[in-house]
Image (tube, rainbow, N blue to C red):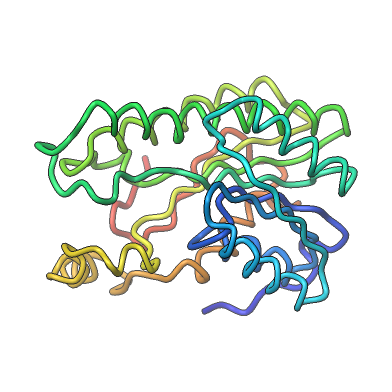
Amino acid sequence: MTTPVSGRFAGKTVLVTGAGTGFGAEIAVRAAQEGADVAIHYRSSRVGAEATAERVTALGRKAIIVQADIAERDQITRMADEVWSHFGRVDAAFNNVGDVARDQMSWRDITEESIDHVLAVDIKGTLLCTHEFGARMLDQGGGSIVNIGSTVVARGSARAPQYAAAKYGIIGLTKSYAHAFAPLVRVNVFAPGFIETEATLGREDWKNGRGDQLRKATPMGRIPGPAELAGTALFLATEDAGHITGGFLVADGGYNMIGA
């Protein structure tokens, strides 16, 4: 794992959705390692959010825990009210929440309920969060939003087409708000490839050879854990990325090699 770069978020406040577990938790902790106070959002994993908050405060940074279902606009507004009231501003927001339809192992198993839920969380929820957070950042004079996407948009998903469709939608809404909020607020997509979170490692297909297959197909020869990629996601909200908006940053070990 890379050594945290000190000071990139010194004196700043970061909001991370879905920060009770997995990638969101690691983004929150890495932000704290780099000097940020952190707003930790969760929907149902209160215990996980508290654990993340403890890791943040152990680093000497401030933490607030907020709960909301991001598929509901009024809950997003309430959450934003709580965070802005507590910290006074948010310099960077990471919209990490997403449903990958993890339990669906084949396109044949798709249900209308799953389609509705994935699209509601991944597209509607990300759009509403971007809308609400971005409007407040404009009022405060600036900020940065990073929406967590996926390289599934490069290859599609025979397993879960609704997931690939949702991640495509995130690109569209990101570009739209990048135009709308410029030049004060930047909006970008960070697109990781496969990540070995606890949830991924617990999947039956992963344990039965899928993980080994993907490692062999990845030029870097491994699948990273979430902590390794947290700093890369944070880069898009730093001053070094100050001329990037409407962008799509890939970190997949060369698996897809997306480019011109």
**Figure quadrant of residue 72:** top right
Residue drawn at x 52%, y 50% as measured from the top left: 44
Image coords of residue 119 (percent x, y): 39, 29
Please determine whether, in this image, residue 202 is positioned above or below residue 252: below
Please determine whether, in this image, residue 32 is positioned above or below residue 137: below
Give the camera-side residue of 168 and 110: 110
Quarter in which the C terminus is drawn: top left
Residue drawn at x 29%, y 52% as measured from the top left: 256
Q: Is residue 214 left or right of residue 144?
A: left
Please determine whether, in this image, residue 63 is positioned above or below residue 59: above
Give the camera-side residue of 51 and 240: 51
Q: Is residue 89 left or right of residue 106?
A: right
Q: How many marks?
A: 0
Image coords of residue 61 (percent x, y): 81, 69
Residue drawn at x 45%, y 35% as measured from the top left: 122
Q: Is residue 115 left or right of residue 235?
A: left
Image coords of residue 12 (percent x, y): 83, 55
Q: Is residue 111 left or right of residue 50?
A: left
Image coords of residue 158 (percent x, y): 16, 41
Residue drawn at x 68%, y 74% as measured from the top left: 55
